Amino acid sequence: MANDKEIQKLIKKVEESKEKGFDLSLDEDLSIAVMNLVSIEEHFYFTAEKTNKTKYFDMLKEVREIRKEVMQKLVKEPEGEIWCLSKHLLAASMRLIEVGNKVNLKKNRKQAEEFYEKAFDLYSLFWALNMKIVDSKNISKIEDAKINRHEEKGKGFLGKIGAVVKRAIECCIE
């Protein structure tokens, strides 16, 4: 369970990463690229199925290879299921942003913001795992009550991780 002392340790890890020249802005761009590459894979799949044209599966395969190469720059030392978790965290984050955008167009700002917050929570968890600011062994020990969207911002595990990730993004090297 992440307590205030552990959060301070996380912040210290972020600061140490910055001192070592870690450039989150570059990796953030790569993470957005991975999100879009996953979406492209999905679109090629559905296009192939809807048109019965297998050439789209060939294009999907090529895009998948690019996505794997880009992910290797972000997910450097995957243990257990971290590689797949990373891909799915980014993909789910992207989809929630898309849903938020669509809901926002329908003039439901409050609901859109809820989707955006969930997207950022997942995106933050991706960074927490890959910057090793959270021990992946402890993820299964997070109490469901601590991931309640009705809590005040910054509380609960994902809220605290999000605050650390925001801090890392704010102090990235340009």
Image (cartoon, grey):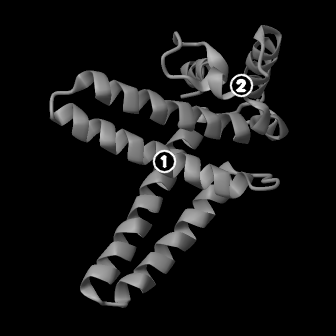
- In this rendering, would 125 be left or right of 170? right
> For the residue labelled by badge 2, is the local secondary structure a helix, a strand or a loop?
helix
Mark 2, residues whose alpha carbon is within 10 Å: few (<14), some, or many (≥20)? some
Residue 158 lies left or right of residue 141; in this view the side is left
Q: Looking at the rendering, which quadrant does residue 27 occupy?
A: top right
Please state which of the two labelled residues, at mark 2 or mark 1, is closer to the viewer: 1
Q: Which residue is mark 2?
A: 18
Q: Nearer the viewer, residue 81 or 11?
A: 81
In the rendered view, does 55 fall on the left or right side of 141? Answer: left
**Residue at image location 47% in from the left, 60% down from the top:** 38
Question: In screen coordinates, is 58 left or right of 103?
Answer: right
Q: Amino acid at mark 2?
A: Lys
Amino acid residing under circle 1:
Ala
Q: CA–CA distance between discs 2 and 1?
A: 27 Å
Choose between 15 and 81: the one closer to the eye.
Answer: 81
Q: For the point 53% across and 28% down, which residue is it? A: 174
